[in-house]
Image (tube, rainbow, N blue to C red):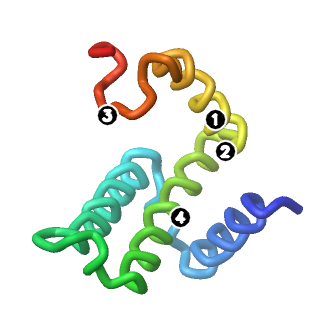
Amino acid sequence: MDDIKLIIDALDKFRKERDWEQFHNPKDLSIALSIEANELMELFLWKNAEDANVEKVKEELADVLSFAFLLADKYKFDIKEIVLDKISKNGEKYPVDKSKGTARKYNEL
């Protein structure tokens, strides 16, 4: 069993034990993902990145990843496939010779 499937199975078991799957429709998973991402960002608010509490960053990042995995699972997406496809598409939008060392968006290169 690969690591991603192991994680999704553990998340699914956790929510089934609590009868929470009824709340995990795509809309609410997406909203929860956004909220958790905001809680992650809040850890960096008004401070230098190195001053953020690393343990809290780890916890919030786990929440973000958990909801992302559950949303992907809801749509039966293969996480490895969609991430690698996106990297490939970004490679086309951000060719190394134009994008290396710059934070400009692809339409500004």
* Residues at discs 3 and 2 in contact (Cβ within 8 Å): no
Categorize mark 4 by other alpha carbons within 10 Å: few (<14), some (14-19), many (20+). some
Categorize mark 1 by other alpha carbons within 10 Å: few (<14), some (14-19), many (20+). few
Q: CA distance from mark 1 to mark 2?
A: 5 Å
Judging by the rendered image, the residue that carries numbered circle 4 is 66
Q: Residue at x 62, y 73 (%)?
A: 16
Judging by the rendered image, the residue that carries numbered circle 1 is 82
Categorize mark 2 by other alpha carbons within 10 Å: few (<14), some (14-19), many (20+). some
Q: Identify which amino acid the numbered label 1 is placed on.
A: Ile
Q: Is residue 9 left or right of residue 33?
A: right
Residue 21 point in image, percent of width and height = 54, 64
Judging by the rendered image, the residue that carries numbered circle 3 is 103
Q: Earlier in the sequence, mark 3 or mark 4?
A: 4
Q: Residue extending furthest right?
A: 1
Categorize mark 3 by other alpha carbons within 10 Å: few (<14), some (14-19), many (20+). few
Q: Residue at x 66, y 39 (%)?
A: 77
Q: Which one is closest to the eye, mark 3 or mark 2? A: 3
Between 72 and 44, the residue placed more toward the observer is: 44
Q: Residue at x 52, y 23 (%)?
A: 96
Q: Identify which amino acid the numbered label 2 is placed on.
A: Ile
Between 1 and 30, the residue placed more toward the observer is: 1
Q: CA distance from mark 2 to mark 4?
A: 12 Å
Residue 54 point in image, percent of width and height = 39, 82
